[in-house]
Amino acid sequence: MNEEIIILDFGGQYSQLIARRIRECSVYCEVHPYTLSAAEIKAKNPKGIIFTGGPNSVYGADSPQCDMAVYELGIPILGICYGAQLLAHQLGGRVETAPVSEYGKTEVEVFTDSVLFRKLTGEKNLPARPGAVKTICWMSHTDYISQVPDGFTVTACTPVCPAAAMEHPEKRFYAVQFHPEVVHSKEGMKMLRTFLEDVCGCSGSWRMDSFVETAVADIRKKVGSGKVLCALSGGVDSSVAAVLLSKAVGKQLTCVFVDHGLLRKDEGDEVEAVFGPEGPYALNFIRVNAQNRFYKRLAGIEEPEQKRKVIGEEFIRVFEEEAKKIGTVDFLVQGTIYPDVIESGLGKSAVIKSHHNVGGLPDFVDFKEIIEPLRMLFKDEVRKAGLELGIPEHLVFRQPFPGPGLGIRIIGEVTPEKVRIVQEADAIYRQEVKNFGLDQKLNQYFAALSNMRSVGVMGDFRTYDYAVILRAVMTTDFMTAEIAELPWELIGKVTSRIVNEVKGVSRVLYDCTQKPPATIEFE
């Protein structure tokens, strides 16, 4: 039986990122709402519990609280941000509005005689305080712990946050005001590993092969003799989902590929070559050319959320129509992954953007049930699952592409002309990145089309055309990302080619914004 960590979600935007980090340590975990009772937690027999962050104030009248009996289970607890404040509040401490909020990279003084921080080296030693070092952590809070509960010891601080961390080693309760799960916390993984290994006693035995084996068994049990329709986009997520379902139910599966006219250049033909009748997989494959249908539905729509919902609904309607053609279909399969879920704002989390396959789904769907076998996985875990399933590396490590496609890489109204521009610009960009040997080193890169038009001069004539935006990021989890510092030679080559070869473009820009505050995509 797998070792398990329970993550209680209090509505934080980083809740799934915490899960991603725990699994990176080869420890299985599940995210549950904060309403999960102590009895339900006890029945799962977890090795530890983690309280996530959240947007509320713990002292508010309607703030989310956990079952007080959780503290009596004898199970180690780590509270992060709101979770740290909740520990303080529920156990007799005090939480107040901070005189000064902290957001972003922050220098934190930590005491290495603490259980949680004993493996930290820090960037600066503090000789005046034996055992103290300074390390960089990611802060994001407006409230703070002004008084720790009885029995707790302060183990970290900043100039404006006197209790940046606290612990009660006898009860195995730990709390940090910052976010160790965010990549900007330089020694965050050391803290999490220490909690998992030294406090919870986890051995790190969970592997992706166990996920694939369990997923196949669960799918077979759920589907039985029913028919399954898989929404195949050709991207990494839907491709892995399709192969997983094929392994589980074989000929009961029909894959429908909707070419909505919002794909990258020549991508429709590439998808058919891989998954169609001439490809290596024994799949029932249907290609639906629905470009005009989608363009018509998107005409005049500029607001990003409305575009996503229109694309999502139209996807489902096409699938319903195709399902009727092949007879009764019981299940719809989608390649939804964890970042899709959290960013769509399900539960207590705020909506960042509705994904076409999550928040963009219509209220009525003509299927018995939707199966999302990758819903609990992050992008890198999906790729590991793909390799475990025997999918070739060049398919598994294909550039990520959102379900709504170029519809969310075109700012403002989507038109066939704008689609042509961004397809051609993106193809040039990807070609030159590959020529520079960077295609396998960048985690995601693409061209988008702004809604900005500006004056230019070409051949002694005045032009008034669009600006193309280039984006490239480095990330491991797709919940946070750093901007990729591309060579100016590459950017210059791409710019020259786009302006000269793509009709309707007079300017090329490079997006230097990390995530957060930006998202990786534009809409």
Image (tube, rainbow, N blue to C red):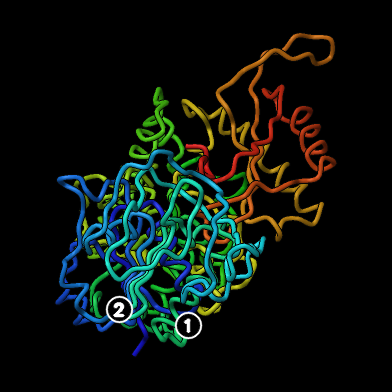
Residue to which mark 1 is pinned? 207
Residue 387, x across and y down, in percent:
56, 76
Residue type for callout 2? Lys
Question: Marks 2 and 1: in contact by CB < 8 Å?
Answer: no
Q: Is residue 457 above or below residue 242?
A: above
Residue 37, x across and y down, in percent:
16, 70
Name the image quarter holding the N terminus. Answer: bottom left
Q: Is residue 265 above or below residue 135?
A: above
Residue to which mark 2 is pinned? 171
The quarter of the displayed image where residue 29 is located: bottom left
- Give the residue at the far bottom of this rendering: 1
Q: Is residue 281 visible?
A: no
How packed mark 2 is, by other alpha carbons closer than 10 Å (few <14, some 14-19, many 20 or more), is: some
Residue type for callout 1? Arg
Q: Is residue 201 above or below residue 467?
A: below
Residue 388 located left or right of residue 327: right
Residue 265, x across and y down, in percent:
62, 44
The Cα atoms of the two marked residues, 1 and 2, are separated by 30 Å
Residue 96 located left or right of residue 340: left
Secondary structure of the residue carrying tag 2 is loop
Q: Is residue 31 above or below residue 89?
A: below
- Residue ID at (23%, 61%): 34
